[in-house]
Amino acid sequence: GAVVSQHPSWVICKSGTSVKIECRSLDFQATTMFWYRQFPKQSLMLMATSNEGSKATYEQGVEKDKFLINHASLTLSTLTVTSAHPEDSSFYICSARGESGRPNEQFFGPGTRLTVL
Amino acid sequence: AQKITQTQPGMFVQEKEAVTLDCTYDTSDPSYGLFWYKQPSSGEMIFLIYQGSYDQQNATEGRYSLNFQKARKSANLVISASQLGDSAMYFCAMRELNTGNQFYFGTGTSLTVIP
């Protein structure tokens, strides 16, 4: 299956700093990428959907100015958590869909564990 | 209303036995896809199996099979011959093909395989 990578896999930062998480599709072109966050022992919650070259669509309740998403190319999307606070500590997962259009093709990255001190 | 419902927060199964993880869904879109993912403690979401709403046959992938009952709107995952490595969280998910890109995830079932 297709591979989606995330970098970093884990990050610890001080409160008030910004953190950038990268999501890359390694062997296919991802027309659409999705960002999720997951709290311990809970399900994945969709934060936003991004299409290459256009602005991301954020889910209700997700602050656009706090969670900046850029999908500058067909293989890279980034999520920047600005002015991070301890409540932003979570597991962030991206997923990518290719151009094939096959409904079962949506691939997940390994996740990034963010801890804000 | 919840799009995906998983009513079993935790399940236990004896090694080498079969186990069924329940999933029901709610949609008015006639065209949809149903997915099961495994999430071990490492956090990675591992795709297990897919069932399209128009698929006539129940999906199977090795030891995984999906018991698709369209009229009941259920898509239970059956794992045969459980192995210790099957211990993980299992998520059922749905994508409505006509109404957008969003995946709807259930709350998950934690499966523990007992030796």
Image (cartoon, coloured by chain):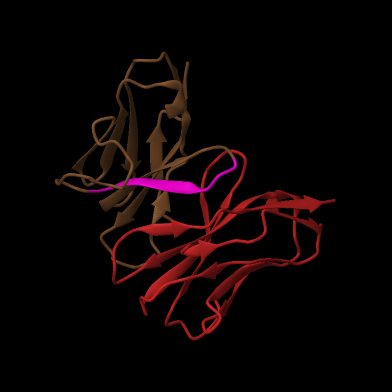
Q: Is residue A49 magenta?
A: yes
What is the quadrant of the N terminus of chain A in the image?
A: bottom left
Q: Is residue A52 left or right of residue B86?
A: left
Q: Quadrant of residue A21?
A: top left
Please state the horizontal and vertical placement of residue B2, each as a whole percent of the image.
48, 62
Q: Residue furthest left?
A: A53
Query: Quick one: A51 or B46, which is closer to the camera?
Result: A51
Tell me, yes or no, whether the highlighted magenta stretch contains residue A100. Answer: no
Residue B37, given in percent of the width and then of the height, sits at 54, 56
Image point 59% across, 61% down: which residue?
A: B6
User: Is A99 situated above or below A24?
Assistant: below
The x, y position of residue B107, in whole percent, is 56, 53
**Overall secondary structure of the magenta section:** strand
- Where is residue B71? Give x, y as percent: 52, 84
Q: Is residue A43 visible?
A: yes
Image height of B96 relative to B101, above or below: below
Q: Nearer the viewer, residue B23 or A100?
A: B23
**Hue of chain B?**
red
- The stretch in magenta equals A41-50
Examine the rendered structure and indicate whether residue B70 appears above or below residue B20: below
| Direction front: furthest residue | B1
Q: How many marks?
A: 0
In the figure, what tint was chain A given? Answer: brown
Task: Describe residue A84's horizontal placement relative to residue B86 as left or right.
Answer: left
Residue A29 visible, this angle: no
Q: Nearer the viewer, residue B39 or B31?
A: B31
For the point 19% across and 48% down, which residue is it?
A: A52
Compared to residue B88, the image places residue B64 above or below, namely: below
Q: Nearer the viewer, residue B2 or B52?
A: B2
